Image (tube, helix red, strand yellow):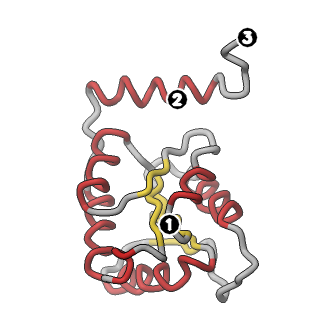
Amino acid sequence: MIIIGADHAGFELKNIIIEYFKEKNIKYSDVTDYDKNLNDDYTDVAIEVCKNVLKNEGNLGIAICGTGIGISVACNKIKRIIATPCFDEYTARMVKRDNNSNVLCLGGRLEYSKNKEDVLNIINVYINTPFEGERHLRRVNKIRDMEDVFGKKLWE
């Protein structure tokens, strides 16, 4: 299942994506299924998306803010999340293939988001690209190990 959420800056883009999911019968859950709220914070959206992604192994997330960067920073504070902003099909392919990303972060105020086809192509590549494993698994496991020692002062 795809877990999707957006703050006010990504609200319109989220709705475009949801309409596409409905057309294609793609199973999704909208964790921000309320009207546009200018007082919302991308940090709260990040928590809801990631919490739900982690409920089931095969879940993926799509988290949207103005640039995709702030929400990716917030998502990456959550253990076992690899959230990656993507700006084109190439970055979407590489973050899934090499990094086993489980949350795609998009920017509702960026140029590519104005072109529905570009956004949907990014999403399709992200959803359909498998993790390559092998040498990349070693690196992803090192990231997991880093998470396990997070909070400890490694420099002392």
User: Residue 61, image x and y in percent?
Assistant: 49, 60
Q: Secondary structure at mark 2?
A: helix
The residue depicted at 37 percent of the width and 58 percent of the height is 86
Q: Name the kind of residue labelled 1 in the image.
A: Thr
Residue 21 screen position, x and y as percent: 38, 79
Screen quadrant of the N terminus: bottom left
Report whether 88 appears left or right of 16. Answer: left
Task: Answer with left or right where residue 104 lies relative to residue 152.
Answer: left
Q: Quadrant of residue 151?
A: top right
> Which mark's residue is nearer the viewer, 2 or 1?
1
Check the image and report above or below for 21 versus 133. below
Instruction: Give the labeled residue for mark 1.
Output: 67
Dot 1 falls on a residue whose secondary structure is loop
* Vertical relation: 37 (above or below) 59: below
Q: Examine the rendering and report whether any part of residue 4 can be seen.
A: no
8 or 147, nearer to the observer: 8
